[in-house]
Image (cartoon, rainbow, N blue to C red):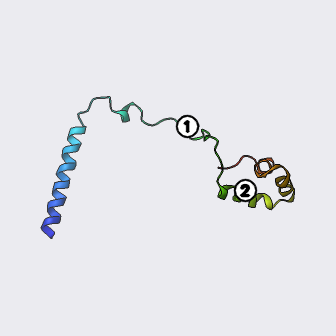
Amino acid sequence: MKTLAVLVLCSLAVVCLTSDASTGSQPADNPAQKGLFVEREQASAVVRQKRAAGELTLTQLESLREVCEANLACEDMMDTQGIIAAYTAYYGPIPY
């Protein structure tokens, strides 16, 4: 069993050493050298893109309803104008 473990470790070391040698002679077209990473402002702009408006699930609507029921004015508005209008009026945009 020890022999097998030593053989596996040796073969792993050989593979690592030969792969490092082959990657060292790559041309400058490597994406990591050109700038794979973007600036923080650009990344945050990509992340903040709004999702397409879709229907809320029953679980999401129930969650909004529970939050709105804690405020009496929001609850009254919810009964007359709907849960989405009441939630956005009192708590801002819907988080999902």
Residue type at tag 1: Val
Q: Secondary structure at mark 1?
A: helix
* Disc sitting over residue 64 in the figure: 2
- Mark 2 or 1, which is nearer the eye? 2
Q: Left or right: 45 with respect to 2?
A: right
44 above or below 15?
above
Q: Residue furthest top?
A: 28
50 above or below 77?
above
x, y percent for residue 86: 80, 50
Q: Left or right: 80 with respect to 27?
A: right
The residue under the point 58% across, 36% down is: 45
Q: Quadrant of residue 28?
A: top left
Looking at the image, is mark 2 or mark 1 earlier in the sequence? 1
> Which residue position is annotated with label 1?
46
Which residue is more in the foreground, 15 or 65?
A: 65
x, y percent for residue 90: 81, 50
Mark 2 surroundings: few (<14), some (14-19) or many (≥20) residues within 10 A: some
x, y percent for residue 39: 52, 35
